[in-house]
Image (cartoon, coloured by chain):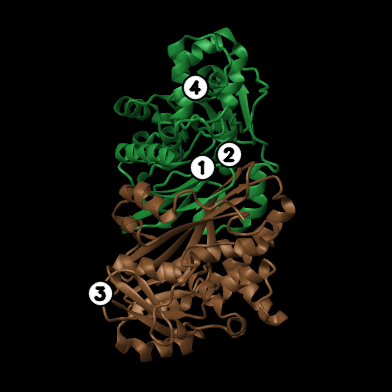
Chain colours: A green, B brown
Amino acid sequence: MAAPPHLDEFARIARFFAPLAGAGGLGLKDDVALIDGPAGTQYVLKTDAIVEGVHYLPGDPPRQVAQKLLRVNLSDLAAKGAAPVGYLLTTALPPACDEAWLEEFSAGLAADQAEYGIALLGGDSVATPGPATLSVAAIGIVKAGRAVLRSGARAGQLVFVSGTLGDAALGVLAAKGRDLGVGAAECAYLVDRFRLPRPRLNLGARLAGIASAMMDISDGLVADFGHLCDASGLAGVVEAGRVPLSQAAHAALARDGGLIASVLGGGDDYELLFTAPKGAEPALAGLARETGVGVTAIGWVEMGQGVRVLDKGGKELALAVKGYEHF
Amino acid sequence: MAAPPHLDEFARIARFFAPLAGAGGLGLKDDVALIDGPAGTQYVLKTDAIVEGVHYLPGDPPRQVAQKLLRVNLSDLAAKGAAPVGYLLTTALPPACDEAWLEEFSAGLAADQAEYGIALLGGDSVATPGPATLSVAAIGIVKAGRAVLRSGARAGQLVFVSGTLGDAALGVLAAKGRDLGVGAAECAYLVDRFRLPRPRLNLGARLAGIASAMMDISDGLVADFGHLCDASGLAGVVEAGRVPLSQAAHAALARDGGLIASVLGGGDDYELLFTAPKGAEPALAGLARETGVGVTAIGWVEMGQGVRVLDKGGKELALAVKGYEHF
């Protein structure tokens, strides 16, 4: 769709921006910042930008663009165990984003404000001759010291994910016209999972105090698990056969087993990825029941570096897709 | 330079975004948001975006682009009387912004972090096929209830500005090659005032408790004074002859009196505009001495609506340029 980043995003951040980070910036390794809030609390700050033609298609419904923009940020708050407070919105819009577009876009924001109990706090609105560029800075709140960082995993702990993985990556393929050999309803389900993330705010908040490290999966399971392992100074192991799949994803994989690379490597899942001690499994099963969001153990963390993915026989899988991929 | 906004920025915000604002968003009328901070404080949140080719020229030194980006946000914090804490940075960069560009850009950020005692807290970095789009969300802190809003002016109070006005607007003309008939040093001074705003943080912080309403001048004196008057439910009067000018601006106006329209209507001053009771003048003179930044009374606020500009004879000036203008 668009040119890939000329310099890998992570390399760029590490080289040019990480040296600028203050203590609250957590070395830019956690995707969020923490600042002191009112008595006994901390604010969690997160900003994420999306560009037309890079992160969404020019023809995508503005309502869904707005909702995705908000939700990818709320997903990061969820992954710290934070409750959302509000957001700042910055829009750089080309003339093609006319009043009808803005009407739908703001309706999407209004719907999600009601859904998630947040309000717009401020922002900026500028013109651009280029593609629409939209960014949100979301503010969440958490009890002081309770934000779940990426760096807290301990060797021997299990790694879990919420919901099902790979739906959005398969949804992108379907939206691009690829025949996944699944029914129309399954196809619509997968595309919707790509268009409308469900930030796991209730589950995330309940996981504070149980999860030792947490983040959301936006760049794909393997890449993001790698970030969590790096931040914790550990290695990670995923058992591919335990990765939870939706019915639609099951159907697609039954027809083309190679799609497992998209499931494990594709992005836009916006599910929680977290580590917890082995004894936590009964409590996690309870939380899954109470929040209605599945929680599945998919592997573990151990001494070492990097992430290995094992097949059902325990043999390491070589995955074609390990990185960040939007379209 | 670029297409003007297809819908006026203020109309767009009022119509589509203001209805989404929560209490901390101050109805989006104050350009900043307030949220509770640690005991007895409030955070002031401000976000501002700049687009290559719209707010700065593609050939502008990346170091200065970084500094301007930070400083326009710090200027808003100054105008609330807040002390800066840190910032989130979002960059959408085209391939042309290569490693050399990033090197210089991050050096500019580092220099200003040292200058203003702030740190990078987090951000996002994405690729764009369009022009570079850069935004900062700046966080300041102020004693609870002491942030100076736009809405606090009272009829009969005087209106003041810091520093000198119009330098940046004349600097833009000079940068575009217009012969202002001033010497090379004056010309360089004016261009520098456009490229590198000086956020009036010390003065702004000292004005909390004295100024009744305050904002920074970014869209031009007349337009921004209009915003302050609207927010306060008052009319404003400016005596053009009292507007403080630099030596360079004086020289340019002596040659072409019509440039007064650029001085009063052009943007990018990043000086403070505030109201205060008449009795405050001695205290303000003291603050000006202590901070080394001039403070000048230029008019007053009264019952009514709109802003009038009077010439030295007390006759209303009709200004050709009243609005927002970058290049």
In the rendered image, residues at marks 4 and 2 fall on the same chain: yes
**Chain letter, disc 1 residue:** A
Task: Give SS at disc 3.
Answer: loop
Query: Disc 4 to disc 2, how far (Cα)?
Result: 21 Å
Asked if the residue under mark 2 is in contact with the one under mark 4, i.e. CB atoms within 8 Å, the reply is no
Q: Which residue is mark 2?
A: A227
A300, A132: nearer the viewer:
A132
Hey, what amino acid is under mark 2?
His
Hey, what amino acid is under mark 4?
Asp
Residue B313 x, y percent position in the rendering? 41, 87
In the rendered image, residues at marks 1 and 2 fall on the same chain: yes
Q: Which dot marks residue A150?
A: 1
Could one spot residue B211 in this view of the protein?
yes
Is A12 left or right of A39, judged from the image as shown?
A: right
Hey, what amino acid is under mark 1?
Arg
Asked if the residue under mark 2 is in contact with the one under mark 3, i.e. CB atoms within 8 Å, the reply is no
Hey, what amino acid is under mark 3?
Met
Query: Disc 3 to disc 1, how far (Cα)?
Result: 56 Å
Mark 2: give few (<14), some (14-19) or many (20+) Cα within 10 Å: many
Asked if the residue under mark 2 is in contact with the one under mark 1, i.e. CB atoms within 8 Å, the reply is yes
Task: Give SS at disc 4.
Answer: helix
The C terminus of chain B - image quarter: bottom right
Q: Which dot marks residue A167?
A: 4
Could one spot residue A212 in this view of the protein?
no
Q: Which residue is mark 3?
A: B303
Query: Disc 3 to disc 2, how far (Cα)?
Result: 59 Å
- Answer with mark 1 or mark 4, whichever residue precedes in sequence: 1
Query: Disc 3 to disc 4, how far (Cα)?
Result: 61 Å
Task: Give SS at disc 2.
Answer: helix
